[in-house]
């Protein structure tokens, strides 16, 4: 029990610190890397909860695919943030005021008696032997949460269509590949046989 | 779950399947034959309406049926809202086709994206769990963000799409945060279970009220109520008129359904807490919307601020948390959709010369150019101002009655005073049309279907006003009155 708690607190601490760093560091590349760290810590906490499938998906999909893509975009766009940040401090007083009000409200909720203390939430009991997290998840997704699951798929479809509709345009004079015509290429298009008289050795 | 339960969502399935069909058919169509897309979309709407109306699912004494593990609910209120969404979208498509042709933007993407938005609207109307509410909302929002930037050559369109996207994501984040608090307090995503859990937790639980605040913020953003209205004028102005038409009408029907389900079915016991929030936002919306609209010279911005004030009136009906109030609100939101579609249809009609008719001056002397369309615009403006016997008057009357019944006289008085102030800018449009000389002499021609749709729209505004009890009865019956 002791070791588990130790692992939990260590990862929680890293998670919170990394999340704080994501929004405070100035360099967007560091920011993305801290987000990777936050995802890793969250995955570790999920592992402690015996949610192996979710933990692995978080690492594979978010760290492996999404964040790498993120880094690509950050590096390729190379946005100069200085002109964007100009005049930011003008809104500082209002922002600070709103932040303080929200922080106070949050703290009031957190400290309200008997609602959010650690003692309110029992330690989750370990699952019985032979329990498969992946199987349980799959059964829920295709029974109780069938409709939300399908609708989430539709949302992704809309995202694809929207991205294509906004970026794909046919402009004349652009050198692009046409895969169809590339595939349809035949020998006659590029190879030409030329009849030539064979060379004869010069008579000496 | 059995197949009979699944069939409750038949209209949604039909719309989804047809949207995918349209997407694929578009690949095989040449530029000249793209009109087929329009026909297919209209066909989708007609059959969706038929399927919805023919749904025979209610047993005696039961007001609603759920499916998909209680995450989907089918009830008369949802059916009425859905059918009106189909009707309004049919009108929108007719207007938009003309606009897209004039501006050489006719692409099937407009139809697929707006049908996906319709699917989101239908799912949100029928959502019975926080998960479905969020997914329906995102489906609507994502489609509309893309539609706002539909004119890719317009930098204003991209800018307003970006603004909408950033603010919309913030609002979604707020909503999700509130939902997580409510989930934490009640342990359920399902609205029915949440209502049940509220009985044991009690209505003064600080965690629940905290979550409620964020949920109300999310709902208010969707409606565009003050102080979460900032996006409305910019998006209305920046988006192409064919898209503004869409944004300003049917998503509001879904927003009403979402507010009703969340605040009444789910968090009805927290009524004392959300009542004050909604009341202050309603008053602010009516005041800010009407005062700011007076100062606008751009008609799209003017209508945007008018939307804000109308949403304040919709909130008025929600405040009492009574069946009559919800019925009145529902009536208002449907009527508002009809009026708004007609108003933007007129803007499209005037902007057929390669440039959008954005300024109020474009309406100058409309009566001399075409008295028929001027009369329809006059009807729309009178109705929005709330002049009897137009339908807008009865909508205002009903929500005010709901508020007075709840004993909030001051709210009703404020609303009426500012509605009178607001009448100024509606009447200004009429003054431009009838008492000024036209600046341009261009005869106005529109395709037959456009004229027919506009005529029908105008008839709805006056017909539903004269025979006002018909729609009012339907709305009240949805809430069991």
Image (spheres, coloured by chain):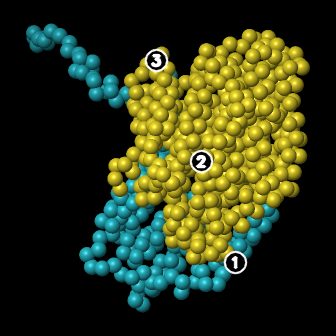
Density class for disc 3 (Cα within 10 Å; few <14, some 14-19, many ≥20) is few
Chain letter for the part of the structure drawn in cyan:
A
Position of B151 relative to B286 (above/below): above
Front residue (pair B169, A182): B169
Density class for disc 2 (Cα within 10 Å; few <14, some 14-19, many ≥20) is many
Q: Quadrant of the N terminus of chain B?
A: bottom left
Q: Is residue B99 visible?
A: no
Residue, disc 3: B33
Tell me the chain of label 3.
B
Do the residues at pointers 3 and 1 share their chain? Answer: no
Disc on the earlier residue, 3 or 2: 3
Position of A100 relative to B375 (above/below): below
Q: Nearer the viewer, mark 1 or mark 2?
A: 2
CA gap, disc 3 and disc 2: 42 Å
Residue, disc 1: A108
Position of B157 relative to B279 (above/below): above
Q: Secondary structure at mark 2?
A: helix
Colour of chain B as rendered: yellow
CA gap, disc 1 and disc 2: 41 Å
Is residue A151 left or right of A27 when viewed as pictured? left
Residue, disc 2: B478
Front residue (pair B466, B360): B466
Q: Residue at x 27, y 18 (%)?
A: A189
Is residue B304 left or right of B188 when viewed as pictured? right
- Give the percent coordinates (x, y) of residue B9: 44, 46
Q: Residue at x 57, y 42 (%)?
A: B80
């Amino acid at each position: 029990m002791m070791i588990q708690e130790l692992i939990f607190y260590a990862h929680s601490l890293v998670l919170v610190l990394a999340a704080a760093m994501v929004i405070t560091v100035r360099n967007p590349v560091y920011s993305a890397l801290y987000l990777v760290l936050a995802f890793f810590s969250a995955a570790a906490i999920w592992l402690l909860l015996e949610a192996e499938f979710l933990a692995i998906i978080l690492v594979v999909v978010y760290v492996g695919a999404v964040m790498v893509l993120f880094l690509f975009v950050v590096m390729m766009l190379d946005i100069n943030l200085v002109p964007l940040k100009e005049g930011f401090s003008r809104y500082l007083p209002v922002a600070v005021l709103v932040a303080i009000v929200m922080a106070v409200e949050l703290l009031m909720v957190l400290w309200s008696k008997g609602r959010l203390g650690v003692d309110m939430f029992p330690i989750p009991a370990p699952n019985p032997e032979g329990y498969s997290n992946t199987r349980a998840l799959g059964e829920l997704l295709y029974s109780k949460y069938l409709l939300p699951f399908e609708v989430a798929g539709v949302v992704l479809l809309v995202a694809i269509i929207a991205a294509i509709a906004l970026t794909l345009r046919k402009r004349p004079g652009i050198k692009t590949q046409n895969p169809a015509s590339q595939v349809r290429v035949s020998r006659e298009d590029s190879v030409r046989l030329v009849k030539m008289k064979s060379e004869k050795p010069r008579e000496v | 779950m059995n197949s009979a339960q699944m069939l409750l969502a038949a209209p949604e399935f039909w719309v989804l399947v047809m949207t995918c069909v349209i997407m694929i058919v578009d690949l095989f169509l040449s530029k000249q034959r793209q009109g087929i897309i329009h026909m297919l979309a209209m066909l989708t709407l007609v059959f969706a309406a038929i399927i919805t109306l023919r749904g025979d699912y209610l047993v005696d004494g039961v007001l609603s049926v759920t499916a998909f593990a209680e995450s989907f609910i089918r009830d008369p209120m949802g059916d009425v809202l859905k059918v009106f969404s189909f009707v309004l979208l049919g009108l929108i498509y007719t207007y938009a086709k003309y606009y897209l042709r004039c501006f050489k933007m006719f692409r099937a993407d407009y139809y697929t994206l707006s049908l996906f938005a319709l699917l989101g609207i239908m799912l949100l109307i029928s959502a019975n769990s926080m998960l479905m509410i969020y997914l329906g909302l995102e489906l609507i929002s994502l489609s509309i963000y893309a539609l706002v930037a539909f004119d890719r050559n317009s930098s204003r369109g991209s800018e307003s799409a970006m603004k909408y996207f950033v603010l919309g994501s913030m609002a979604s984040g707020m909503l999700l945060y509130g939902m997580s608090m409510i989930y934490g307090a009640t342990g359920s995503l399902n609205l029915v279970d949440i209502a049940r859990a509220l009985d044991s937790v009690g209505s003064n639980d600080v965690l629940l009220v905290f979550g409620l605040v964020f949920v109300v913020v999310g709902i208010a953003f969707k409606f565009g109520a003050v102080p979460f209205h900032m996006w409305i004028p910019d998006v209305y102005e920046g988006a192409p008129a064919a898209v503004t038409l869409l944004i300003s009408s049917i998503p509001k029907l879904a927003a009403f359904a979402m507010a009703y389900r969340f605040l009444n079915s789910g968090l009805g016991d927290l009524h004392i807490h959300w009542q004050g929030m909604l009341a202050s936002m309603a008053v602010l919306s009516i005041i800010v919307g009407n005062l700011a609209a007076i100062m606008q010279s751009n008609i799209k911005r003017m209508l945007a601020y008018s939307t804000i004030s109308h949403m304040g009136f919709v909130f008025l009906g929600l405040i009492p948390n009574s069946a009559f109030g919800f019925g009145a609100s529902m009536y208002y939101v449907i009527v508002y959709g009809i009026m708004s579609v007609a108003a933007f249809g007129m803007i499209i009609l005037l902007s057929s010369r390669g440039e959008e008719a954005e300024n109020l001056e474009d309406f100058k002397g409309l009566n001399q150019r075409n008295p028929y369309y001027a009369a329809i615009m006059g009807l729309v403006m009178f109705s929005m101002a709330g002049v009897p016997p137009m339908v807008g008057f009865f909508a205002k009357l009903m929500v005010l009655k709901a508020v007075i019944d709840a004993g909030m006289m001051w709210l009703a008085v404020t609303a009426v005073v500012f509605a009178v102030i607001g009448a100024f800018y509606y009447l200004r449009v009429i003054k431009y049309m009838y008492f000024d000389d036209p600046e341009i002499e261009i005869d106005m021609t529109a395709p037959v279907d456009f004229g027919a749709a506009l005529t029908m729209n105008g008839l709805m505004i006056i017909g539903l006003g004269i025979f006002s009890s018909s729609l009012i009865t339907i709305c009240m019956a949805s809430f069991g009155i």
